[in-house]
């Protein structure tokens, strides 16, 4: 009987993680429709991809410029939390992002290798990318040359390619 309880707990945890992941991706209705159960979902409980966006990484762009770029693309500037100074990034408690539905996306730029909440991975970016069921979707903000860099143009391009 104990083995059955362990199995039920493991399966329940896996399904919970998948529900959170598909909800963040805006694909919860599809995921639920694939389960072998009858469930009439209510859109009142399903999160659309219009939640908060965390922009984190060192940048010289002013916060008002980020908000202006978002507004110019028709994205509500209130959706953004901006952590763009070296010290803010270094102190940010990344472990609070795990299993959180507060953010739909994390836009990342350059950051210190030593940050709060880093577990066994080489960097927080690797930790988030290697655990997509645990963290919100990660978007790398890259320069034209492919370098991790948050500029006005790279931020705008990241929004255009991933949000609108």
Image (tube, rainbow, N blue to C red):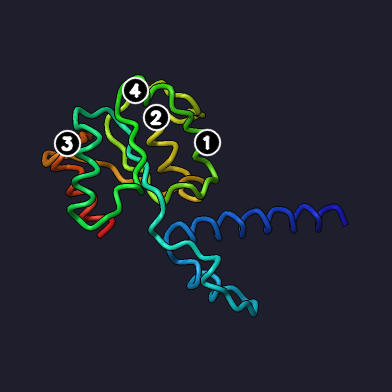
Q: Which residue is mark 2?
A: 123
10 Å crowding of disc 2: few (<14), some (14-19), many (20+)? some
Residue 151, disc: 3
**Marks 2 and 3, how far apart at CA:** 21 Å
Distance from disc 4 to disc 2, alpha carbons, whole Å, reads 9 Å
Image-based side of 111 in relation to 29, left or right: left
Q: For the residue labelled by badge 4, is the local secondary structure a helix, a strand or a loop?
A: loop
Note whether 98 is above or below 157 in the view shown: above
Q: Earlier in the sequence, mark 1 or mark 4?
A: 1
Q: Residue at x 19, y 27 (%)?
A: 60
Residue 154: quarter of image: top left
Q: Which-is-in-front pick, marks 3 and 4?
A: 3
Mark found first going from the N terminus, 3 or 4: 4
The residue tagged 1 is: 96
Is 154 left or right of 38, judged from the image as shown?
left
Q: Residue at x 85, y 52 (%)?
A: 2
For marks 4 and 2 on the same chain, the one whose residue lies earlier in the sequence: 4
* Residue underneath mark 4: 112
Which of the two marks, 4 or 2, is nearer to us in this view?
Answer: 4
In the figure, residue 55 lies in which quadrant? top left
């Amino acid at each position: 009987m104990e083995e059955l309880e362990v199995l039920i707990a493991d399966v329940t945890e896996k399904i919970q993680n998948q529900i959170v992941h598909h909800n963040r991706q805006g694909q919860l209705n599809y995921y639920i429709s694939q389960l072998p159960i009858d469930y009439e979902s209510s859109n009142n409980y399903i999160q659309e991809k219009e939640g908060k966006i965390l922009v984190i990484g060192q940048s010289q762009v002013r916060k008002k410029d980020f908000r202006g770029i978002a507004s110019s693309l028709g994205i509500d500037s209130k959706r953004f939390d901006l952590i763009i100074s070296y010290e803010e990034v270094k102190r940010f408690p990344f472990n609070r992002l795990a299993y959180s539905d507060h953010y739909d996306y994390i836009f990342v730029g350059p950051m210190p290798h030593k940050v709060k909440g880093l577990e066994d991975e080489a960097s927080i970016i690797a930790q988030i990318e290697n655990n997509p069921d645990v963290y919100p979707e990660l978007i790398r903000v890259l320069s034209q040359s492919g370098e991790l860099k948050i500029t006005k143009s790279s931020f705008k391009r990241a929004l255009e390619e991933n949000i609108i």
